[in-house]
Amino acid sequence: MKPRRKRSQATPGKMDIRGVAALARVSIATVSRTINHVPTVDPTLAARVWKAVQELNYLPNTQARALVSGRSRLIGLIVSEITNPFFPELIQEFEQAAVARGYEILIGSTNYETQTMEVCARRMLERKVDGVAVMTFGFEDFFLDRFAAENIPYVFIDPAPSRPLNSVLAVNYLTGISEGVQHLAVLGHRNIAFISGPLNRRSAISRKEAFLSCLHSIGLKPNPDWLIEGDHTLDGGRDAMQKLLAQPNWPTAIMCSNDMTAIGVQHAVFEADLRIPDDFSVIGFDDIHLTEYTIPPLTTIRMSCRDLAARAMENLLSRGKTIAGTAPSAASAAPPPAAPNKSTFRPNQPSATITTHLIVRRTTGLPRKALQDLRQDPSSQTQPQQPPRNSRQRGSVQE
Amino acid sequence: MKPRRKRSQATPGKMDIRGVAALARVSIATVSRTINHVPTVDPTLAARVWKAVQELNYLPNTQARALVSGRSRLIGLIVSEITNPFFPELIQEFEQAAVARGYEILIGSTNYETQTMEVCARRMLERKVDGVAVMTFGFEDFFLDRFAAENIPYVFIDPAPSRPLNSVLAVNYLTGISEGVQHLAVLGHRNIAFISGPLNRRSAISRKEAFLSCLHSIGLKPNPDWLIEGDHTLDGGRDAMQKLLAQPNWPTAIMCSNDMTAIGVQHAVFEADLRIPDDFSVIGFDDIHLTEYTIPPLTTIRMSCRDLAARAMENLLSRGKTIAGTAPSAASAAPPPAAPNKSTFRPNQPSATITTHLIVRRTTGLPRKALQDLRQDPSSQTQPQQPPRNSRQRGSVQE
DNA sequence: CTGAAAGCGCTAACAA
DNA sequence: TTGTTAGCGCTTTCAG
């Protein structure tokens, strides 16, 4: 039976390890060792190999490597909605961290749909990712189990770990939210609403609970009518605010479960011809870059996505098959670029905690009533225009 | 020499094609044919195979498939800055299109740096992507050539094709920009500024040139001081507007090379205590979702990223090795899910043209001067409040 | 229509 | 230290 094709027919443009070996007059094993930075290679031979690599413009075939080594050098990254600017910022960090270590990231968006989650999980499994970072809430435990079953390390965000500790990225919502609530309280707000994320899953509730507990701790009790469920989107924020505006009693401040919601709120307030922060103070969550640019710039709670990404990658890689495998630095065809950067992270890191902090910008201020009081108390003098409520004339109406 | 490990040691949880074959009492070849939907498989055997697949929860190993077939089912997607919301919207479309056809996408952001472009190109090459969509301007021709050399289909955006036609996605900027300029002209604007993208590369100039040519065609000549170079970011837009504001003469309208720039402009105007559209009309470009939510909502030029993504994928896949390869639908372990969806796109599609259109929202209006004229001409009657200019009282100044 | 077997390009035992 | 060689899991001839 004749072989399908003679091995390594010197096909131009499709250089493989054999071609390099031939040109360098060494065995393919030596080539492999060289490009993998195995230290026991004779420098003379190594030099010849690198020369051949450059000359032939050789790039190792990742598929083959993955097949034999069992490690794909692919990290899965599951987010809820890539369209929410928080995630691109996160993805950017992931990309950098991954590429720096010779990995690629595989992105999957769940769009909050169980069906899509399943597809994402399957994709990750099929591509044999070396680890998965689940950066969204409400990812069904069931799918997490599948990763566990395949022995794929995963990390996910959870305020109340129900899982192996080393796979949890704990986010300390409380700090930031409590700073936010106190900030509002100090300004004089007593009527604070909260627009949550999608509440259909267990963990999406945590920011809301953090809010409730902060409220309680400063002696305020929540008005159930002011606890609105949003969905972390612009539209959701706008709709939620419209619901609030439709009620007979209005809060004076609104905390939002994320920045997109807050931007939606700003829009709704603008459409209603009301003003921020005069009529309502609003606070977001995430501190996406855009918040510096909203009108007015949004007061929000910062959660460092750089930290999040770094911690997640660190955690994943430190638990991977790396220990038994090759050096973390890929061959890539970069000659001897300083020493391979191994072991820069700790062995079996437990859960990391990401903290959150309030960033005050310009959507928070004194509540209207306080402003009026300020004006009325000092002894009731004539109030020239009694302006505040609804009195503002907009320049030119353009509809 | 003893083999490293007996083949298929019935390792639980790590099911391979052999396991399926054993359970189904057929050869691995039959399993392969079945899951690849080769039509000549005996239905009885096929049924047994699918049953085994389900029972074992078998997922074909993508790496192995890729290695032997030479096709990775990976599509590269190169963008400039994932942090610009236009791209996530684009990526979302790509992800859907890719996954639907059994592909994954590999994302690379160049951040406009040549160095990073090189890394991106290398990553794509190493992972042996089946095609690359270059959705950013200024990607060096040099790297494009490498793809060509490796016989990897690529598409990129270019208004003036300097490359094989079938790899160009032509975007018709002129339509949208001309609609924008005319819209402004009709409103009475004669002094129109343009904030471009980064001009350091050939093709980034095209939107600007489109603008210039539109200006010319309605008999206006550009003021060089009002042609500012931005960089397609929020910060860049703000800075550019500040430069404009520092000049002795102000334009009455500003067109921006993308939406982020326009949002930066809105911010700068806000900071300067001026108003849009009263003091300046502004028009963006891209029509990202966010533009509906800016304050006020941004008039912009829509370029359908859904179209862009669809066209790019279509183009890439139709040119790929698919023709000689297997059916486009992956095995994935989906039994007989209706007929495999083959040949839904045309064979060797030439360049596609994406059109652009003006979306009028609320950042464009009459220029100040026109407003004043309106008021003064009709016969100078008492003007009760002379409201427009700066007259609007802002609720409370919050600095 | 089915099964046996030859590799895809590479890594990792093992032998030398 | 270096070379030889056996597969990684799969697709695809080719012979039955």
Image: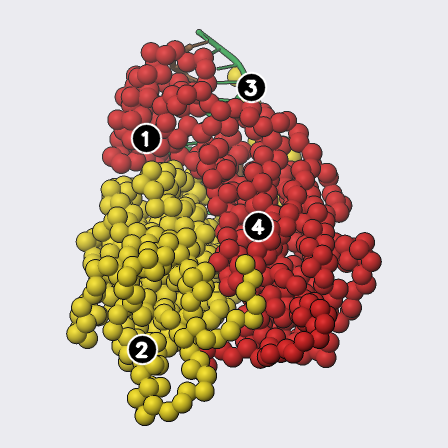
Chain colours: A red, B yellow, C green, D brown
Q: Real-space Cα distance between discs 3 and 2?
A: 91 Å
- Which residue is located at x 22 percent, y 51 percent? B202
Q: Earlier in the sequence, mark 4 or mark 1?
A: 1
Residue under pointer 2 = B369
| 1 vs 3, front mark | 1
> Toward the viewer: B360 or A350?
B360
B161 with respect to B323 (left or right)? left
Q: Earlier in the sequence, mark 3 or mark 2?
A: 3
Q: Mark 1 is on which residue type?
A: Tyr
Q: Mark 3 is on which residue type?
A: Lys
Residue under pointer 3 = B2
Q: Chain of mark 2?
A: B
Q: Real-space Cα distance between discs 2 and 4?
A: 52 Å
Q: Residues within 10 Å of mark 2 (few under 14, many from 20)?
A: some
Q: Position of residue A120 (x, y in %)?
A: 57, 53
Q: Mark 4 is on which residue type?
A: Ile
Q: Chain of mark 4?
A: A
Element assignment for label 4: strand
- Can residue B75 be spotted in the picture? no
Q: Residues within 10 Å of mark 1 (few under 14, many from 20)?
A: many
B281 with respect to A90 (left or right)? left
Residue under pointer 1 = A58
Q: Real-space Cα distance between discs 4 and 1?
A: 33 Å
Q: Mark 2 is on which residue type?
A: Lys
Figure check: B228 above or below B252: above
Query: Are both tags, 3 and 4, on one chain?
Result: no
